[in-house]
Amino acid sequence: MPPETTEDGRKARNRIRVKHARREDLGLTPLEFRTLARLNTPEKIQAWVDRIPQNFEIGGQTCLSVRQVLKQNRALCIEGAVVAACALWINGDPPLLFDLKATRDSDHVVAIYKRGRCWGAISKTNSPVLRWRDPVYRSLRELAMSYFHEYTNRRYQKTLRSYSRAFDLRHLDPGLWITNPKHCWDLGWALDAAHHYPLVTRRQEKQLRLRDGIEREAQKLKIFRKPQG
C-alpha cells in the first residue's frame, strides 16, 4: 500500500471516531446505503450474505469492493466480509475483519463483532462448516480455534495455522474497499501482511488426524454449485 500522508492519517483518525457511518462518509448511493442500513443486526447481515450467490471467479481472480458485490450479486469470503463489515459500521459496530491463514489451502476472511466481552463472526462461504459464529468466544484465539477442526483441504488434512489481529477497516480510505470500481487488492495484501498468531506447534502439526469417512462425506456439501462449461 502507498505510504500514509499526514492528511491520510488525519482522515483515518476522524473515521475511527465515527460510530455510525453516514452515507456521505462511505460514498454510497442512497439505494446502496438503504440496502445495508436495513441489516441492523449481525443475524440479518449473515442471512443476507448467505443469499448472495457464490463468486466462483469465472474469468479470473477477484477482490470485489462493497459496491461491486452489490452490483454483481456474487461474493467469496473476503468480499462477503467487507460487505458485512460495512453494514456493521452503518449500524454502530466497528468494521473489523479477521484473517484465518492456512497451509496447503486457501485463507478465510470473516467480519467480526463483539457482544459484551465476547466475539462472534459473520462469514461468506460455500461450505456448511466455515460459517457464522455466535458471539460466545472470549478471545480471538478461541474464535479462530472454533474453525480448526472443520478447516481442511481436498486431502482431508487440517490446514488452519494462524489468525490475525482484528483488522479495522476505518484505517483505510473507503474508496479502497467500499466504492472501488475495480479490485481491492491493496486491502487483501494489507490483511495478509498483518500480524498473525500461530494456533499449533510443529509437533502438534505432525499429530493431526485426517478427517474420517463421514466427515469427508459432509465436506462434499456445497450451498451453490459451480456452473458447468
Image: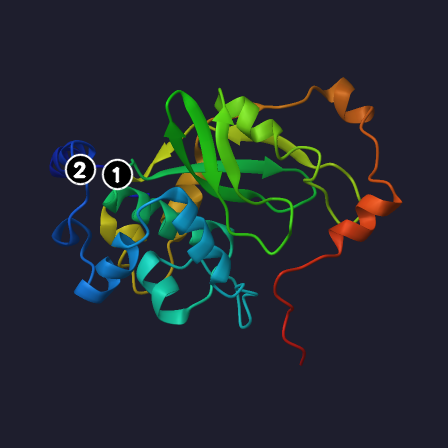
- Which residue is located at x 54 percent, y 66 percent? 57
How many numbered marks are there? 2
User: Judging from the image, what secondary structure is the residue with disc 2 in?
Assistant: helix
Question: Measured from the top left, where is residue 126 in percent x and y?
Answer: 60, 56
Question: Measured from the top left, where is residue 43 in percent x and y?
Answer: 43, 45
- Which residue is located at x 64 percent, y 70 percent? 226
Q: Quadrant of the N terminus?
A: top left
Question: Measured from the top left, where is residue 88 in percent x and y?
Answer: 31, 43
Picture layout, residue 206 above or below residue 89: above
Kindly identify the amino acid type of the residue bearing the numbered disc 2. Arg
Left or right of 144 in this view: 104 = right
Q: Which mark is residue 206?
A: none
Picture layout, residue 213 above or below residue 33: above
User: Judging from the image, what secondary structure is the residue with disc 1 in?
Assistant: helix
Q: Residue furthest right?
A: 213
Left or right of 73 in this view: 128 = right
Disc 1/disc 2 C-alpha distance (Å): 6 Å
Res 192 visible? no
Which of the two residues, 64 or 28, is positioned nearer the viewer here? 28
Q: Earlier in the sequence, mark 1 or mark 2?
A: 2
**Hey, which quadrant is residue 16 in on the image?**
top left
Which of the two residues, 192 or 43, is positioned nearer the viewer here? 43
Q: Label 2, on which residue? A: 15
- Which residue is located at x 35 percent, y 65 percent? 70
Are the residues tagged 1 and 2 within 8 Å (C-beta)?
Answer: yes
Question: Measured from the top left, where is residue 6 in percent x and y?
Answer: 13, 33
Q: Which mark is residue 170?
A: 1
Kindly identify the amino acid type of the residue bearing the numbered disc 1. Arg
